[in-house]
Image (cartoon, grey):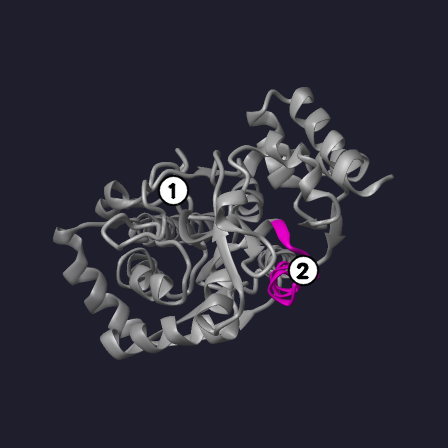
């Protein structure tokens, strides 16, 4: 009996030795490098996987264009689930906790991507494309990269505001000629925090309080709404309009144009591969596509490309990004500062 037990234990030990290295080998084999040398292998493996699932906050009209180009090029099906940034974040975390790994790739605002980093859900990636991206597009941990950039710009109604009268600095907004003419989007606390910090922190907030007291600030919820109110003439000059929306309205014949003042801020979504991706090669291929061919699509829908090989609407190409880690950690603080400075009388 003792001998039989020893034999069973030996067989069990051998089985464990065989299984564990295989599992470890599978984990180690997950792709994490994109280069000219590795691309052929990634494409071949991705085609064998045949599909991937992308969770994103990008609008359906925009994601459809990206999917169409990717599927046409590689013949790999993309299933997309779209919702708001917070909803995507919560769904990825919930599915991970339940060990139902449905998403292969996630793309949401960078502060929410940092939350995924904090939960250790993303795969660090090395890519030769990183050198082509705008400064600040890839954090040191390399667990996401900027794939969509939207500029905060100032938009004005061209029937109500002359180009030669536009402000050149935020201090110019203290001029009484702007009384009753200024507007701002009601959730842009990160924008205000970053601009105020650039203007000296407390001194920056003091300036915006003075602007509010002197000339008023019409607070509206929704960037598209604010842009449309500029076009309609209800808000002659708005401080925080998404650049692409102003461009689209102008192209449609609306009396609206846009300009920037230093620092030019960019709002970005980050793209990352989930470390439990069921289709790791297809996910990595989609990641590479989004930072290369996908950037031409982004430019065509009036976003700012993160890849410097694609023409940018910014003439000097200089922009500053809202710090996603600080934005995530200081949410309550920034919201209170915004309320106290802009919203309250």
> Looking at the picture, does residue 297 appear above or below residue 186?
below
Q: Label 2, on which residue?
A: 222
> Looking at the picture, does residue 99 appear above or below residue 131?
below
The magenta region covers 223-238
Q: Position of residue 331 (x, y in %)?
A: 69, 38
Disc 1 secondary structure class: loop
Q: Position of residue 214 (x, y in %)?
A: 77, 35
> Looking at the picture, does residue 42 appear above or below residue 270?
below
Which class describes the residues within 10 Å of circle 1: few (<14), some (14-19), or many (20+)?
A: many
Instruction: State which quadrant residue 278 falls in.
Output: bottom left
Residue 65: numbered disc:
none
Residue 137: numbered disc:
1
- In this view of the protein, which residue sits in the foreground, 92 or 57? 57
Q: Nearer the viewer, mark 1 or mark 2?
A: 2
Q: Does the magenta stretch include residue 237?
A: yes
Which class describes the residues within 10 Å of circle 2: few (<14), some (14-19), or many (20+)?
A: some
């Amino acid at each position: 009996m003792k001998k039989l037990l020893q034999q069973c234990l030996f067989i069990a030990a051998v089985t464990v030795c065989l299984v564990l290295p295989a599992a470890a080998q599978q984990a180690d084999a997950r792709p994490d490098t994109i280069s000219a040398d590795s691309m052929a292998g990634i494409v071949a493996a991705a085609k064998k996987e045949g599909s991937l699932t992308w969770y994103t906050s990008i609008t359906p009209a925009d994601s459809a264009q990206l999917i169409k180009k990717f599927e046409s090029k590689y013949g790999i099906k993309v299933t997309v689930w779209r919702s708001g940034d917070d909803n995507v974040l919560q769904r990825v975390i919930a599915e991970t906790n339940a060990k139902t790994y449905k998403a292969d790739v996630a793309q949401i605002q960078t502060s929410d991507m940092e939350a995924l980093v904090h939960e250790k859900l993303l795969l660090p990636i090395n890519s030769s494309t990183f050198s082509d991206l705008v400064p600040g597009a890839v954090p040191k941990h390399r667990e996401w990269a900027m794939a969509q950039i939207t500029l905060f710009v100032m938009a004005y109604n061209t029937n109500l505001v002359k180009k030669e009268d536009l402000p050149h600095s935020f201090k110019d907004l203290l001029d009484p000629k702007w009384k009753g003419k200024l507007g701002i989007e009601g959730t842009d606390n990160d924008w205000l925090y970053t601009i105020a910090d650039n203007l000296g922190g407390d001194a920056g907030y003091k300036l915006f309080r003075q602007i509010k007291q002197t000339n008023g600030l019409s607070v509206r919820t929704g960037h598209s709404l604010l842009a449309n109110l500029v076009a309609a003439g209800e808000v002659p000059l708005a401080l925080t309009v998404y650049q692409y929306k102003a461009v689209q309205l102008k192209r449609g014949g609306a009396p609206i144009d846009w300009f920037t003042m230093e620092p030019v801020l960019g709002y970005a979504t980050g793209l990352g591969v989930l470390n439990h991706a069921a289709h790791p090669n297809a996910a990595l291929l989609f990641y590479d596509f989004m930072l290369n061919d996908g950037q031409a699509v982004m430019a065509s829908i009036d976003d700012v490309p993160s890849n410097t090989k694609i023409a940018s609407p910014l003439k000097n190409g200089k922009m500053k990004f809202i710090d996603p880690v600080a934005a995530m950690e200081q949410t309550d603080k920034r919201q209170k500062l915004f309320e106290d400075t802009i919203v309250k009388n």
